[in-house]
């Protein structure tokens, strides 16, 4: 089964959570906009294709299905590629964790765009400093403590007692936070999460992906952005 992934070019963004899943299981896929340009996305957003109407990228096309929203895409891919334990309870648990990651990622985004996504960061710098201070002091510790506890409850290696797409997403969150908030992250005690992230990075397919040009570097166009004044 091959897939078509639609996400904006030039940045990792939310599409990276889906890429990591596809790369980990060596699933054949085309990162469509990187081949055809961002204009390839627009007909779907305009409702000019059959299938469900996505609100925004990322979305995945497979056969006649059009699946949008990161957690929803991973909920679809997980059981088809052995990236979630068998059973309804495990699938729901994985989906719950991924939805919590989605909430966390939204808060990361809002550190540099706390007022409006229609304005540049430079137009809301003061508000971003205030938002980031709260994020560094309260939200990072709160979310990391939750996921640290989830890994501990899963047996200290995985939140779901075996490798899953949630591990891949937690790796991306940890990598993004280390890039965007290195000083704040240096203060965090999250040994189980750090160990999990390292084990994910060492997985053969993920290691190969991270070393390839398919893995774009973090930059100031994505969700995880490094602005020194927001990490002070």
Image (tube, rainbow, N blue to C red):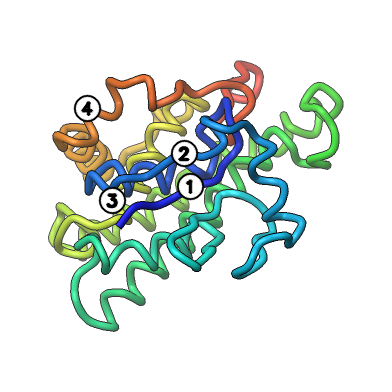
The local secondary structure at tag 4 comes to helix
Q: Are marks 4 and 2 in contact (CB under 8 Å)?
A: no
Q: Nearer the viewer, mark 3 or mark 2?
A: 2
As displayed, is residue 74 above or below residue 96? above
Residue 74 place in picture, x, y as percent: 39, 60
* Res. 146 image quadrant: bottom left
Q: Going by the picture, which residue comes out furthest to the top?
A: 228
Q: Residue at x 45, y 24 (%)?
A: 216
Earlier in the chain: of badge 3 and badge 4, it is 3
Q: Nearer the viewer, mark 1 or mark 4?
A: 1
As displayed, is residue 19 above or below residue 104? above
Tag on residue 31? 2
The local secondary structure at tag 2 comes to strand
Earlier in the chain: of badge 1 and badge 4, it is 1
C-alpha span from label 1 to label 4: 19 Å
Tag on residue 5? 1
C-alpha span from label 1 to label 2: 5 Å
Q: Are marks 1 and 2 in contact (CB under 8 Å)?
A: yes
Residue 6 located left or right of residue 19: right
């Amino acid at each position: 089964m091959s897939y078509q992934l639609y996400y904006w070019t030039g940045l990792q963004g939310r599409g990276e959570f889906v890429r990591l899943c596809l790369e980990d299981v060596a699933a054949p896929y085309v990162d469509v906009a990187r081949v055809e340009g961002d204009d390839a996305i627009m007909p779907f957003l305009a409702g000019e294709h059959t299938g469900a109407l996505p609100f925004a990228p990322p979305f995945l096309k497979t056969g006649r299905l059009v699946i949008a929203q990161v957690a929803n895409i991973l909920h679809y891919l997980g059981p088809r590629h052995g990236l979630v334990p068998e059973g309804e309870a495990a699938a729901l648990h994985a989906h719950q964790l991924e939805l919590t990651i989605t909430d966390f990622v939204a808060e990361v985004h809002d550190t540099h765009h706390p007022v409006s996504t229609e304005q540049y960061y430079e137009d809301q710098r003061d508000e971003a400093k205030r938002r980031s201070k709260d994020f560094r002091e309260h939200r990072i510790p709160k979310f990391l403590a939750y996921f640290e506890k989830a890994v501990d409850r899963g047996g200290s290696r995985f939140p779901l007692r075996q490798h899953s797409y949630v591990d891949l997403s937690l790796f991306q969150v940890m990598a993004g936070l280390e890039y965007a908030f290195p000083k704040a992250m240096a203060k965090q005690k999250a040994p189980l999460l750090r160990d999990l992230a390292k084990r994910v990075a060492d997985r053969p397919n993920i290691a190969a992906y991270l070393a390839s040009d398919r893995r774009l570097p973090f930059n100031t166009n994505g969700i995880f952005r490094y602005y020194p004044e927001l990490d002070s």
